[in-house]
Amino acid sequence: MLNFALEYTLTMLHAPKIINKTLSIRLSLMIVLAMSFLLLASMVCMLHFSRKAVKEETLLSATQTLDGTIARIDNVLLSAEQTAGNFYFMILPHLNEPDKMYKFSKELVESNPFIIGCAIAFKPGFYEEGKEFMAYYHRMDEYDSTLVKSETFGTSRYTQQLWYKQPMQTGKPGWMNPMTDVDGVTEPIVTFCLPIQQDSENVGVIGIDVSLNLLSDIVLGSKASRNSYCILFDGDGTYIVHPDSSKLFQQTIFSQKEYKTEPGLKEAADAMLRGESGYRPFTMNNAEHFIFYKPFTRTTVRGRSMEKLNWHVGIVYPKEDVYGEYNNLLWYVLAIAIIGLILMFILCHVIIRHMLKPLKLLTASAQRIAEGKFDEQIPDSHHTNEIGHLQDNFKAMQQSLAVNIGEMEQQKAILQERGEELKRVYNDIKKADRMKTAFLHNMTNHMITPAAQIDKDVSTLCAPSASTDTLNLAENVQKNGDTITKLLNDLINMSEEEMRKEDAYENED
């Protein structure tokens, strides 16, 4: 392992030298680098618009889910309202028959699977002076269809409960928010209250109970994404629909710890309570989420009570559900891009190396030619591109250079031969000149003695005892002899000087 690390380190240290030295690697890196910039720009644009499209698709999906959720909830409510209205007109002819009130209550619950309880209550003394009357049937729970008859609803008197008092006072039908004011009621419900009128007087109330657990199951059954869920709460923040059933009766949005610690959730809740539509990011359980929300609006139906419920619906998306596939796509694209660039580098390197193979051959041939191997054989090129033309031209240049070098070698041999011949001639000339100089020197040496003798004899003739004519003649002879002597001395000096120069030249050679 240590040896591998050492080899890898040395390779990385020598990588710049290898890159600078190898043309194919440099060209491949330049191509890959250019493609990387183009690919990076394309990826940035693609991912930007993909993220935008994902966000728009999520917003559209959330809007459709919110509308669908509202429609499903409203269908449940409308179904309960219509059932109550139908039985209302069935009850009116039998108001004076208290026993039939139990029958109508039971049949009403049985006729609609969304209804888990029905109470038909009349004002005290309606049937018997001073006595209260309420016919009440309810299911064991939202998942058990067994009906139970009961005389009471909760532990307090029904006349003190809001579902009864409000319709009796206003004479208007409407939905009551989850029953948190009724002691002894542990199951979260919403109640539709329909006042019973006789001779324009409110004499009783029909209360239709819809389970919030059942309503949550209906709404949460259709999910926009794997981990998304819907919530519905009223103007007090009380949950009407929530995936955690324990919150439906015991908790409000304001009592959640995230409402106090997470600004995004607080802003979203406050905006929902103001009746706004939109979305907000927030963090819950260390995970990022989006909440899309809008006010709950009921469908307008003729004869329907259209009082404002002040309900608010929202859909919570974990950010992973929104951008999970996008993030996976990002990593996939990045991995594919890296692998593609590596494969492109390898492919470019192989192709460029193959294309530059003639250049490598020419480089090696040029190196051998530079070393003096002018007869280097360069093969014919099989390429028709610029590199092929370069190889052909280089081959022609090498052949021309070889011919010229051969001719130069021949000329050099001829010149050397002529030089040797000239050297021999020069030596012969020097030898002849030396012989001439030696001859002159020898001759002058032999001439100087007689000339000196002539000078001596003439000097004798010129003695005072000689005659005048003889003296004149002797004087002339003496003058001529002096001249001869002088010339001979000069010739000897010149011959000696020439001999010294020739000796110096010979020493230099």
Image: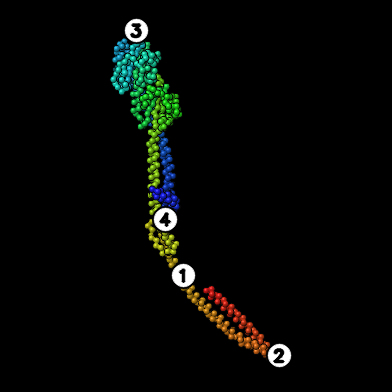
Label ID, residue 412: 1
In the rendered image, residue 253, in percent from the top left (x then y), is placed at 41, 25
Amino acid under label 1?
A: Lys
Kindly indicate whether the residue at mark 3 contacts the one at mark 2 (C-beta within 8 angstroms).
no
Q: CA distance from mark 1 to mark 2?
A: 78 Å
Amino acid under label 2?
A: Pro
Amino acid under label 3?
A: Glu
- Check disc 2: other Cα within 10 Å, few if <14, some if 14-19, many if 20+: few
Residue located beneath label 2 in the image: 464
In the rendered image, residue 108, in percent from the top left (x then y), is placed at 31, 18
Q: CA distance from mark 2 to mark 3?
A: 217 Å
Kindly indicate whether the residue at mark 1 contacts the one at mark 4 (C-beta within 8 angstroms).
no
Q: Is residue 365 visible?
A: yes
| Mark toward the viewer: 4 or 1 | 1
Indicate which disc, 2 or 3, sits on the residue closer to the N terminus. Answer: 3
Q: Secondary structure at mark 2?
A: loop
- Check disc 1: other Cα within 10 Å, few if <14, some if 14-19, many if 20+: few
Amino acid under label 4?
A: Glu
Residue located beneath label 3 in the image: 129
Residue reaching furthest to the front? 2
| Mark toward the viewer: 1 or 2 | 2
Q: CA distance from mark 3 to mark 4?
A: 118 Å
- Check disc 3: other Cα within 10 Å, few if <14, some if 14-19, many if 20+: few
Judge by depth and name the residue closer to the eye, 355 or 265: 265
Indicate which disc, 1 or 2, sits on the residue closer to the N terminus. Answer: 1
Residue located beneath label 4 in the image: 386
